[in-house]
Image (cartoon, rainbow, N blue to C red):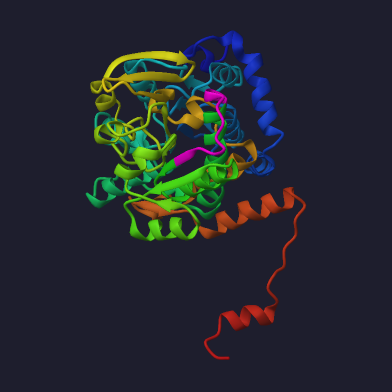
Amino acid sequence: MTNASKESIITDAALAPEGKLKIDWVQAHMPVLNSIREQFEKELPFKGLKVAISLHLEAKTAYLAKVIQAGGAEVTITGSNPLSTQDDVCAALVSDGITVFAKYNPSPEEYKSHLIKTLETKPDLIIDDGGDLVTILHSERQDLLSQVRGGAEETTTGILRLKALEKENKLQFPMIAVNDAFCKYLFDNRYGTGQSVWDGINRTTNLVVAGKTVVVVGYGWCGKGVAMRAKGLGAKVVVTEVDAIKAVEAHMDGFTVLPMGEAAKIGDYFVTVTGNRDVIRGEHYDVMKDGAILSNAGHFDIEVNKVELEERSQSKRTVRRNIEEYQLKNGNKIYLLAEGRLVNLAAGDGHPAEIMDMTFALQAMSLKYANDHYTALGNKVVPVPYEIDEQVARIKLASMGISIDRLTDAQKKYLDSWAE
C-alpha cells in the first residue's frame, strides 16, 4: 500500500479502474501535455518538491497531476468545487501514488477540511482555482506560508482575489496569472466554456434551445463563448453588462444588450459568467417568466442569489437530477441548475480535452517558471511569459499538422526599426 493510499480521503478505492479509463481517454487527446510530460520526465524540474493542487477534480485535471508527478513532484490534490469531483478519478489517482483529499458532494465542513489537509502537506508550489488555497494560507494557516515558493492561478475569480491581496501588500509569494494568458482566455474561456456550458445545460434539461431567448450575464471571454454557442443553437441572445466597452462589443457582435431588469422579463435561459455575486437576484425573480431556467458558469455559487430565490418561493423540490424547481409565491416556477454551481462541471464533464490540453500545458509550464524564478519574481501577480504562451501554441499547431510562416531576417529588421 502506497503512502498516498494510506493518507488519502476518497469515496471508494475500488472505483479506480473506471477512473483510469477516463484518464487514458483524455491523455490520448492531450498532445501538448504529452509533449511536456516527455520533457518533464527527462529534466525532472520538480524533483524533491511537494506540489498542492486545487482544481475541478476530473479526468483532465488528473492527467495534469500525473504530468507534474512525472516531473519529480510529490503531488497532493483536492477539488475546487464540491459537485465537480469525480470519485472514480480520485481513486485512480490514489492508485498511481498521488495523495487525494476529495469526494463528490462533501459537506461544507468536509470540503474545507480537504483544502486544509492538502495544505498541511507543506507544499513548495501550488496550483489554485478560485483562490481558496491562497486565501486559507493568508488567513487561518499562515503557519504554512514560509514553505511556499509560488504557484499558478486558473481563473478570473482567483486572480481578482490575488490582486486584492497584492494591492494590500499582503500577498506572500508570486502567483502566475494563467487565466490571463492568450492560450487560456482565447480558447479555454471562449471555446471551452462555450461548448461545455451548453453540454451541461442540454444534457441536464433535455429541452430545445432553438427559438428561445438566452440571457448571457457578462460579456467577457467566457460570456462571448456562451453567447456564440447559444446563437449557433438557434437562440435569440440577450447580453447584460456593466462594462460600457464590452456592451458595445456585444451589440456589434449582433446581440441585444439590455439591463438585467429588462432582460429578466424575456429570458428562457439565463447563464451567469461574471465572477461577481448577486447578478441575478430578488427583483429579477419577480418579473421572470414561468419556467425560466437559471444556471451559473462563472465561479462560486453566489452569482445567482439563492437566498432571495428561496425567500420568494413557497416550495422547492428536485424534479430531475441537477434541477431544482422553485415554486414562487406569485405562482411562477423557476428552475435552478446544479445548485447554482458551475453548470458545465457540476452537471457535465467540463471543457473538451483538446481545450484543456492547452490550459493545463500553461499550468505545467507556469509552475516550472514559478519554481525556476521565484526568488526574482517578488510577491505579486505575474503574467504568463509570452514565450510560454507561444510554445504551447506551437506544440498545439504541430499536433494538428498545421504549419505557419516565420518572419524573414529583413522583416524582423523592419519591425525593429523606426526608419523606413
* Viewer can see residue 365: no
Residue at the image point whose x is 48% and y is 15% from the top:
320
> Residues in magenta?
203-214
Relative to residue 300, is residue 312 depicted above or below? above
Residue at the image point whose x is 50% and y is 56% from the top:
254
Residue at the image point whose x is 31% and y is 52% from the top:
242
- Residue 412 position in % (x across, y down): 63, 78
Which residue occupies the extreme bottom position in the image?
420
- Left or right of 38? Residue 272 is left
For the C terminus, the image quarter is bottom right
Please tell me in which quadrant of the rendered image residue 68 appears: top right
Relative to residue 312, is residue 151 depicted above or below? below
Front-lying residue, 359 or 114: 359
Relative to residue 399, is residue 323 depicted above or below? above
- Residue 199 position in % (x across, y down): 57, 32
- Left or right of 265? Residue 65 is right
Relative to residue 124, is residue 237 depicted above or below? below
Please tell me in which quadrant of the rendered image residue 279 appears: top left
Please tell me in which quadrant of the rendered image residue 388 appears: bottom right
Residue at the image point whose x is 67% and y is 50% from the top:
396
Query: Residue 246 lies in magenta, yes or no?
Result: no
For the N terminus, the image quarter is top right
Which residue occupies the extreme right position in the image?
401
Query: Residue 204 lies in magenta, yes or no?
Result: yes
Front-lying residue, 406 or 1: 406
- Residue 269 position in % (x across, y down): 45, 34
- Residue 172 position in % (x across, y down): 30, 44
* Viewer can see residue 389: yes
